[in-house]
Amino acid sequence: MKVTLLTCTPEPDRVVAAAARLCYSPEDPAAILRGLTPARQKELLARLRTAGHDSPLEHASFTFTIEGVSRALSHQLVRHRIASYSQRSQRYVSEAGFTFVVPPSVRRSPAAEKRFHHLIEEIREAYKDLVELGIPREDARYLLPNACTTQLMMTMNARSLLNFLELRCCRRAQWEINCLAWKIRGLLQAAAPLTFALAGPACLVRGKCREGKHTCGEPYTREEAERLEEMEEES
C-alpha cells in the first residue's frame, strides 16, 4: 500500500482558522488573515474542535493518491460519500496478470495461503481465456476477486477526513482500511498539524469509545499511536 498526499489547500490551518474567525468578526477577510499569527491559529482551532463548530473545516481539502489496495478496501472507502473519487477502470484497463492483496489471517496459515494462491492463478487464467475468446474486458472482469489491487485518487475536506479517521482508525475497522487510515492520519498531521491535532479513534481523541456495547475494550494509548505513526513512515 502506498499513500501520497498529492495536493491540499495552501496553508490549511490558516484557512480554517480564518473561516472560524470570519463568523464572529466585523473585520474584512484580508484583515482577519493578517491577524492570524500561529498562536492565534492554534487558539482558534482548539476552540473550534472543542465547541464542535465544524463547518469551517470544510474550506480545507486534501487530495491523495492510493495505490496497491484491494477492491475490497475501495468498496468500503466510497461509503464515505462527502468526497470525490477517481479509480482505475477494469472496463478499459487489462487485468491480465493482476496483482492482489492477501489478508494477514490467510498468510498466517500455510494451507489457507496455498489454497488462496491456487484460486488466484485459476482466475487469472480464466480471465485471460475469456479475453482471448473475444469477451470484452468489461464482462471478463466479472471473474475478478475483491483481492484484486487497484489505484485511486481521493479528495476530502478536513471535516470529512476527521470523521473518516475517527471511524477507520478504530480497532474494529477492517484491517486494510485501518492501515490506510493511520497512513492518512500521519500525512495530515504533517500538512495541517493544528487542524488534525485531535484526529483518530474516539478512544484516543476523546478518551471514550463511540462503539457502545460493541467496544473492543482495548483503547489506544498515545504511545501506541506514536508507534503506529513511526511504522507508517517507514513503510
Image: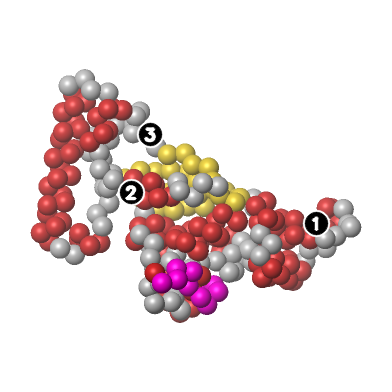
- The span picked out in magenta is 204-213
The answer to which image quadrant residue 15 occupies is bottom right
Q: Which mark is residue 72?
A: 2
Q: Neighbour class for label 1 at 10 Å: few (<14), some, many (≥20)?
A: some
Of labels 1 and 2, earlier in sequence is 1
The residues bearing labels 1 and 2 have C-alpha atoms spaced at a distance of: 42 Å
Name the front one of labels 1 and 3: 1
Q: Neighbour class for label 3 at 10 Å: few (<14), some, many (≥20)?
A: few
Image vertical order of residue 130 relative to residue 176, above or below? above
> Is there a contact, CB below 8 Å, between mark 2 and mark 3?
no
Q: Is residue 206 magenta?
A: yes
Residue 41, image x and y in percent?
73, 66
Identify the secondary structure beneath mark 1: helix
The answer to which image quadrant residue 125 occupies is top left
Q: Which mark is residue 159?
A: none
Q: Residue furthest right?
A: 26
Identify the secondary structure beneath mark 3: loop
Main secondary structure along the magenta-highlighted residues: loop
Tell me the kind of residue under disc 3: Ser
Q: Residue furthest front?
A: 213
Q: Is residue 82 magenta?
A: no
Quarter of the rendering occupied by the C terminus: bottom left
Q: Label 3: which residue?
A: 89
* Left or right: 215, with 14 as reference point: left
The residues bearing labels 1 and 3 have C-alpha atoms spaced at a distance of: 42 Å
Q: Which mark is residue 22?
A: 1
Visible in this render: residue 121? yes
The answer to which image quadrant residue 173 occupies is bottom left
